[in-house]
Image (cartoon, rainbow, N blue to C red):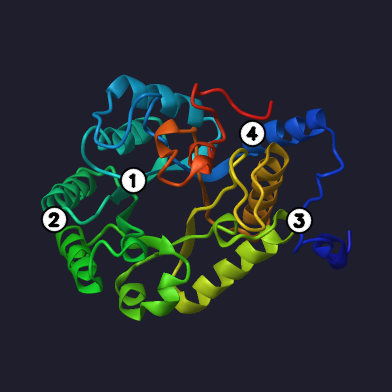
């Protein structure tokens, strides 16, 4: 095969629109078996929401479902049972990107950061994420966030630490980019109203822009995905076909270009309806009953 053969359609990705449902499902089922780099761990079962206590049984059960398909698991909080996620992941032979959830509640932030430090000191954290989209939500000032990151770095200097936010925040906030050991970027063509035809090209551009801002530091895509149901967001159409197409394109590109990517997300979570509109509940590769979708 010539070098050119490997570049054909490398920007636009696969065209699966002409395939019938059965063939699409076969593609989807086969691709996870090659192994995804990582996935966001959806912790909450039907009827649960953030603030509810997670049980060891539910974490173990969901981890056992994900284990055959992934190398890394990402968690989003370190309290109320979420601290079990990296523990169970390590016991399952998986690596961990562990997040402390920060927000406007400063007392809760203290619990999160101290719990993340403890997990890291106990050996359960491969990469630490101090905060998730705090700047995007305007929950904290930049200096407050920097202080939390400094605290973690001082307490656990041998564990790489970053901060998760939309890719463009790392262009706009050089102080945050500078303090991070690794750049953790969320890249969502869907949430910028991109049509599925251009979504792979757009995600690649998001990644390259983040790499430029990172100035040589490792860039990890911490979230990307496409919902299979819900309302249209400008040019972005939720559908089963588009969700499959985006997943396949993202995974193919990640494997081909050696990009570390955490797909969002593992399981559908009904509590997200209202938080992100009606599409919020349909980002999972597995449904709310823990069944693999599209098969």
**Residue identified by numbered label 4:** 33
Q: Residues within 10 Å of mark 2 (few under 14, many from 20)?
A: few
Query: Where the N terminus falls, by quadrant?
Result: bottom right
Q: Nearer the viewer, mark 2 or mark 4?
A: 2
Image spot of residue 161 (x, y percent): 31, 61
Q: Which residue is mark 1?
A: 76
Choose between 212 and 111: the one closer to the eye. 111
Q: CA distance from mark 2 to mark 4?
A: 42 Å
Q: Earlier in the sequence, mark 4 or mark 1?
A: 4
Callout in the foreground (3, 2)? 2
**Labels 4, 1: front one:** 1
What numbered label is drawn on residue 130? none
Kind of element beneath mark 1: loop
**Residue under label 2:** 106
Q: Secondary structure at mark 4?
A: helix
State yes or no: discs 1 and 2 in contact (Cβ < 8 Å).
Answer: no
Q: Quadrant of residue 68?
A: top right
Answer few, some or many: residues within 10 Å of disc 3's Cα (few below 14, many 20 plus, some between 14 and 19): many
The answer to whether 203 is drawn above or below residue 279 in the figure is below
Sequence-wise, the earlier of marks 3 and 1 is: 3
The residue indicated by pointer 3 is 13
| Real-space CA distance between mark 3 and mark 2, rounded to the nearest whole angstrom | 44 Å
Q: Residue at x 35, y 27 (%)?
A: 59
Q: Alpha carbon of mark 3 to alpha carbon of mark 1: how far?
A: 30 Å
**Residue 164 in the image, given as x and y percentages of width and height:** 38, 59
Q: Earlier in the sequence, mark 2 or mark 4?
A: 4
């Amino acid at each position: 095969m010539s070098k050119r053969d490997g570049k054909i359609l490398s920007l636009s990705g696969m065209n699966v629109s002409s395939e019938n449902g059965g063939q699409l499902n076969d593609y989807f089922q086969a691709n996870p078996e090659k192994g995804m780099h990582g996935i966001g761990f959806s912790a909450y079962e039907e009827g649960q929401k953030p603030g509810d206590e997670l049980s060891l049984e539910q974490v173990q059960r969901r981890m056992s479902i994900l284990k055959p398909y992934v190398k890394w698991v990402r968690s989003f909080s370190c309290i109320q049972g979420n601290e079990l996620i990296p523990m169970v992941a390590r016991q399952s032979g998986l690596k961990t990107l562990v997040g402390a959830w920060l927000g406007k509640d400063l007392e809760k932030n203290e619990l999160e950061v101290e719990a993340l430090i403890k997990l890291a000191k106990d050996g359960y954290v491969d990469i630490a994420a101090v905060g998730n989209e705090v700047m995007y939500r305007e929950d904290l000032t930049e200096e407050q966030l920097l202080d939390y990151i400094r605290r973690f770095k001082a307490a656990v200097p041998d564990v790489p630490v970053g901060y998760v936010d939309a890719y463009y925040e790392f262009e706009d906030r050089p102080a945050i980019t500078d303090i991070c050991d690794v750049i953790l970027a969320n890249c969502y063509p869907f949430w910028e109203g991109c049509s599925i035809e251009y979504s792979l090209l757009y995600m690649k551009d998001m990644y390259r822009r983040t790499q430029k801002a990172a100035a040589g530091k490792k860039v990890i895509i911490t979230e990307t995905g496409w919902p299979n149901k819900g309302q249209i967001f400008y040019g972005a159409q939720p559908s089963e076909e588009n969700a499959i197409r985006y997943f396949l394109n993202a995974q193919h590109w990640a494997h081909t270009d050696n990009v570390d990517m955490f797909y969002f997300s593992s399981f559908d979570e009904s509590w997200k309806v209202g938080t992100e509109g009606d599409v919020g509940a349909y980002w999972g590769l597995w449904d709310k009953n823990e069944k693999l979708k599209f098969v």
